Image: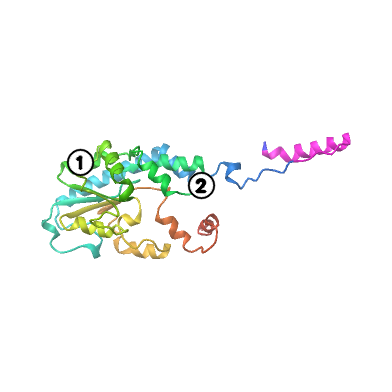
Amino acid sequence: MTVFRPVLLSFALLLSACAGTPTAVPPPPDLSSTAATGAHDNLNATLWMQTAAEYQAAALGGFAQAKARLDIALADASINALPLPEQTQGFESLPPAIITDADETLIDNSPFQARRIRDGGDFDPATWAAWSNERKARGIPGAVAFAQYAASRGVTIYYVTNRDHASEYQATADNLRALGFPLADDNRNLLLRGDPRAPGKEKGERRRFVAKDHRVVLLLGDNLGDFLDGVGSDVAARENLIAPYADWWGSRWIMLPNPSYGSWESAILKACAEQPSTACKREALRYD
């Protein structure tokens, strides 16, 4: 219908002129606006995570790889999955542990993203906290089965997430436990941002806390900050940060797909100063 609108408008003007009465012609819709088009930065990403068999396959493949690499690490006491600066001597004799992120690594928060698309507006911490306290996040395909397998092999799983300790701790524990993730009765293997035992914002301090008593055999996440500190920089600096660990992806480190949000997005925007984010992202596109 849009293609023929100019012709219909011209015909209406012609009829109006012939009748001798002026007709007000409404302006065409602003097709650049979200309201007019239904467009949203996160629409396709959220739909992919909620509906695509390809996403399920990617997640299942990631956890299958994690299971295989876990078996290898358990048979080789020299394997340590911590970033090199965080490793200390004598880890070989310690009991094994896995450190994993929660959101979009083990549990699915895509309904929260869907609500943002429906309601509009930017990310709001209060709305996020309300969602997490609903305790409705579902398991990522393959996540619960992998976690239970690791526990059956005598591996302690530490859930290191940047959810807020003060406002989301109990709800996060309840959600994980209800889904079947192995969690200690006192939740000691759950470390949220602001945990008094390791209160640093970045996850390195919490990884080192775990490593005091465990050999960390595997890291899982959906964001670079789940594996390394110092990721809040620009695109080039982040590429340099991961260069020494090229062989660790898929072996000691398992990355789950998350096109919806992450520190990759803020890395792009660092080059933009006051430029609107959409224009900035378009300038970051490569065409050859």
Drawn side of residue 8 relative to residue 63, left or right: right
Contact flag, marks 1 and 2 (Cβ < 8 Å): no
User: In this figure, which residue is indicated by the disc labeled 1?
Assistant: 149
Q: Nearer the viewer, residue 23 or 168?
A: 168
Residue depicted at 19% across the width and 57% down the height: 211
Mark 1 residue element: helix
- Main secondary structure found in the magenta portion: helix
Identity of the residue drawn at 43% across and 44% down: 127
Q: In the depicted view, which residue is nearer to us: 154 or 245?
A: 154
Q: Position of residue 272 (x, y in %)?
A: 51, 63
- Residue 21 lies within the magenta run: yes
The residue range painted magenta reads 2-25
Amino acid at circle 2: Gly
Residue 15's place in the image compared with 270, above or below, is: above
195 versus 150 height, above or below:
below
Q: Amino acid at mark 1?
A: Tyr
Q: How many marks?
A: 2
Identify residue for label 2. 121
Could you tell me residue 81's position as x and y percent? 23, 56
Can residue 255 be seen by looking at this rendering? no
Q: Looking at the image, can residue 95 be seen?
A: yes
* Mark before the other along the chain sequence, 1 or 2: 2
